Image (cartoon, rainbow, N blue to C red):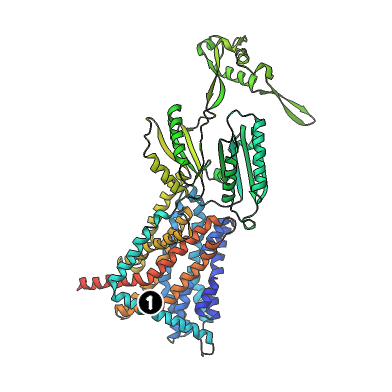
Amino acid sequence: MVILVVWFFLRQFLPSLIIAFTIPFSLLISFIYLFLNNKTINVISLSSLAIASGMVVDNAIVVVDNVYRHMERGQRTMEASIFGTSEMFLSIAASTLTTVVVFVPMLFISGVVGIMFQELAVIIIVTLIASLFTATTFTPMLCSKWMKLRKGNSNKLYDFFEKMFKSWEDFYSRQLGWCLRHRKTVIAGFSAVFIASLFLTPFIGNEFSPEEDSGDMRINVSLPVGTRVEETNKVAAVIEGIFEKEVPEAQYFYVRSGEVTGVGRTLGQASGSYIIASGAKLVPKAERKRSVFKTAQDVRNKVKDIPGVIKTDVTTGSPIGRLVSGMGGKSIQVEIIGNSFNDTNAFAEKVKQIIEKIPGAVDVTVSRESNRPELRIDVDREKASSLGFNMNTIASSAKSFIEGSTATKYREKGDTYDIYVRLTDEYRSKIEDVENLSMVSSYTGNQVKLANFASVYETKGPMDIERLNRERVVKVECNTYGRSTGKIVEDIKKELKDIPLPSNVMINFGGDAEEQGKAFKDMALLLILGILLVYMVMAAQFESLLDPFIVMFSVPFTFTGVFVAFFITGTTLSIISFLGMIMLMGIVVNNAIVLISYINILRARGLKMKDAIAQGGRERLRPVLMTTITTLVGLLPLALSRGEGSETWSPLGITMIGGLIVSTFITMLFVPTLYAIFEAKLKKNHK
């Protein structure tokens, strides 16, 4: 697509081929870098090359276009190649550096964002520097050998497009003239557009990272604590029937109930006689009509209506993805920190009721199960000590009697079997049985009944006691459907403001909300740093503080394009789209740099300011359009992709396309107008 765009504007085979050669040679250098640093070809490295594929031709386009203009003025091919390249060298070097510098800070980010973006930043930096090297060495060499002026008018198609491009240039020149005559109107109009775009921000969602439709779906269902496994199996059979009937897209599914040991337990799967763990793997995305998110929601609604179900947890995405990223649990977690069980449990119940009323919040649960029946053994430590017992001996003995322990191992024909021993049911089924357990003192060897130094009674208690920074914590968690995580968190925070907080109780947001807050702070810092670095590079290139200041006015309008693109496509602000905004800081100024630097060259040759702006705009229109459109078509497959994993990278393409289209339009009219205003003021002050 990039090559076709170049050929459309040039309509000549050899110049198009010269520019097209920039792509493989630049990407080849990137692959050399990957090889030398033992890097792999993966989703991030390939996405980096896809992003760069439309940008690597920008420098070559500017060089070839300028060389051709020199040839049209009568210079020989060799001279045109030398002077045409040298004339544009500083401009394309500055435009490349402005793009590169926004990626440099990414190399020093830590955490999840750093892991995701460091490799992307390095590959794009290497590719862009390679394109600059290629455009200033390889491209002019090919121009000197292959470039020829077109002779004759036999090609009607060529003449048709030439007239069309000339009409565009004349139209643009006239619009520039109108803008220069109505400067206040232009400034006020574009400023109003920018301010109006800010009103779209309340309608734009935000989240940590877009969730991929990988076809994985997992459902954990909780019945009342203490439910026998036979009853749990009956509900599991109903869930199995729901999968068979409601999920025809499933390649396979599983339903499991009861205790889990080993790997399943370590991966964070729920376990217990009253727990049902189920899941499904759907067919590839292209072979089904429903997304995994819609399928999961349909199944969720069916499972919730099953009698006896008190808690559901439906999750989608890679089974170990959240564990690898360090974000186990549900998307939104309200952490209630405090040592009092009564206070934190009561407040957690209030928070749960609030979240259940918020649109988009599903599977709302409290992490602490406080109604599990249990037998509690209260040991009189003084009596136990006088009889020769310590707490470790009592606890381990009780565990061996009731739950059991491995006494020894039996080996036969190379196989080893654990010999597991415990009391039979008739000796461990009642409170009296526990009280009559005989404990052997490790000091005296005497046997003493447990009832002599401890009391045993029935009570209810929590399944687990979670701690955060050594303090007890209970989490109110929920998943999301149909709304972004950020918008739901905003609603929760608004509602929580109206609830009085008990003393010695604190609230914290965990899960995706916590990671999103950290990541957005890092990305905002990168954005500011990128803008400063871009300004510094331009100041060095222009040897002025004013011209870069004028060019930087194209940056705010980038956000206008981004907000409009988000609003139209329903894209959310995430770390991926945030990355696109940071990248745009270095890209959107390129056209303004080429335009302003060429206007300065024309003014240095003696043209008046208005004439220089009109002629510079006319002569730079084609290369600006070519560089912009080639970058856009390079990003287009990324934005339009609907295949596996497209949810991750399509927001990047949408962000950059929206920002680039609007900023280019603004650059071509607003920046020259602003340039004329500042130059006129400077001359007036100078006089």
> Residue visible at 47% across and 48% down?
485
Name the one closer to the observer, 468 or 473: 473
- In the picture as drawn, the residue positioned furthest to the right comes out as 413
- Above or below, 647 against 239 in this view is below
Neighbour class for label 1 at 10 Å: few (<14), some, many (≥20)? many
Compared across the picture, whether 534 is left or right of 478 comes to left
User: Tag 1, which secondary structure?
Assistant: helix
Residue drawn where x is 48% and y is 61% of the image: 654
Q: How many callouts does the rendering have?
A: 1
630 in relation to 441, above or below: below
- Residue at figure coordinates x 55%, y 17% from the top left: 457
The percent position of residue 68, horizontal first and vertical second, equals: 46, 81
Q: Residue furthest left?
A: 687
Q: Residue at x 61, y 29 (%)?
A: 227
Residue 148 appears in the picture as rendered: no
Q: Amino acid at mark 1?
A: Gly
**Residue that badge 1 annotates:** 617
Regarding residue 170, the answer to whether it shows in the image is: yes
Query: Residue 602: image x %, image y %?
Result: 34, 78
- Above or below: residue 42 compared with residue 316: below
Say which quadrant the C terminus sits in. bottom left
